[in-house]
Amino acid sequence: MMSYFSITRRLCLVVAIAVMTSSCSVLDWFDNKPDASTSVKPVAEKPSDWTFFHQWRVDNPPLQSLVPDEHMTLTGQCYFSADMLALLKSKPKGLLVPVIKTTRDLTLSPDLENSVKLYQVLRSQFPLSGAGDSLTFYQTLLSSIEHTCPDNMTREIDSCRFKRWMSYVGLEGKNTVYDKGRLTRWYTSHSSIKYLIMGSGDLFNSDALLSARYSENSRVITEQPLPVREKSIRPYLGSVRFDWVVPGSDGQKPFVSLGSCTLSWQELEQQRRLHGQGWMDTASLAEVNKLLLPYFIELMNEATKAMPEQTR
């Protein structure tokens, strides 16, 4: 018979071998790898932003008296946020607000000819509402401004008398550019339109619109001294910008930009940096915008072709 010590010795050897051969499974038990049988839910990938850059040269440009170069270099840039791309992916209807032109007296009016040209280019990429909606929205914007009863209005509105009385007794609300209630009613009655394309969202958010007209030959909303009109419109001249905007909610500006395209004249910008921002008078800057607008439409023709595939 085997002695007690021999048996114990053999048992220890068996246990040691068992531990050695099972060491991997023991370590695996402590490993915190996920169970292969557990399904991992895929995370939806948010679209990234989209940018576009285009530069070209135009020989013998107009306005050489302002910028004495034999050519002008045009630089176009577009930026669409991921939120804008996500919105476009669902193919919603948009609306092109009429192109705005600045006249020599620094008042604003719709440029219907260039509105049609830009509309024809944009509709290849963006499902746009018709021209009738575009014009009625512009009229709603201007009537909304009038119904805030700004100073120096050029026509009488009965409700403004009541608002003046409210102001007299201290019940007047906060002054804004627009009567937001009128805009909200328009949005509600055109619920299929989810975004707007407009010439500079900042311009439409500003009180420069107080110097706007319903049409080229109609009266301006308010009578403003020329220095006031000049100060309000100057920041938006010298380059062409259009914004893709959505209506702002409470506490936000009326129009919130989710994307934009801008066209600038490189040699002109160099001169402005050299001589200072006040180097060129405001009326001449308005002429620059008039010159650049057809080239901006050309830029949009290229940009729409380069848009991400999923938004087409």
Image (cartoon, rainbow, N blue to C red):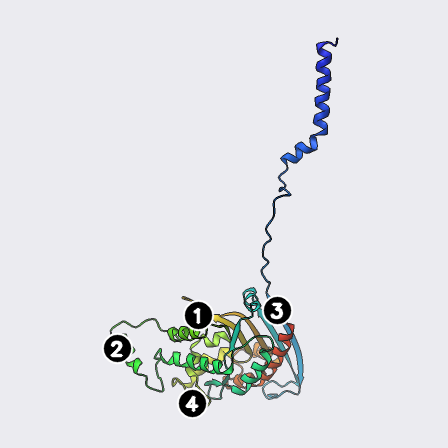
Q: Which mark is residue 165?
A: 2
Nearer-N-terminus badge (2/4): 2
Instruction: Please state, as top left, top right, bottom left or bottom right, where the N terminus lies in the image.
Output: top right
Q: Amino acid at mark 3?
A: Thr
Q: Amino acid at mark 4?
A: Ser
The CA span between labels 4 and 3 is: 39 Å
Q: Report the residue marked by disc 3.
A: 51
Position of 280 with respect to 209 (left or right) is right
Secondary structure of the residue carrying numbered label 4: loop
Q: Which mark is residue 253?
A: 1
For the point 35% across and 79% down, which residue is it? Answer: 147
CA neighbours of label 2 inside 10 A, class few (<14), some (14 to 19), many (20+): few
Instruction: Please state, as top left, top right, bottom left or bottom right, where the C terminus lies in the image.
Output: bottom right
Cβ–Cβ under 8 Å for marks 4 and 1: no
Q: Report the residue marked by disc 4.
A: 218
CA neighbours of label 4 inside 10 A, class few (<14), some (14 to 19), many (20+): few
The CA span between labels 2 and 4 is: 29 Å
Nearer-N-terminus badge (3/1): 3
Relative to the observer, which residue lies in front, 142 or 220?
Answer: 142
Nearer-N-terminus badge (4/1): 4
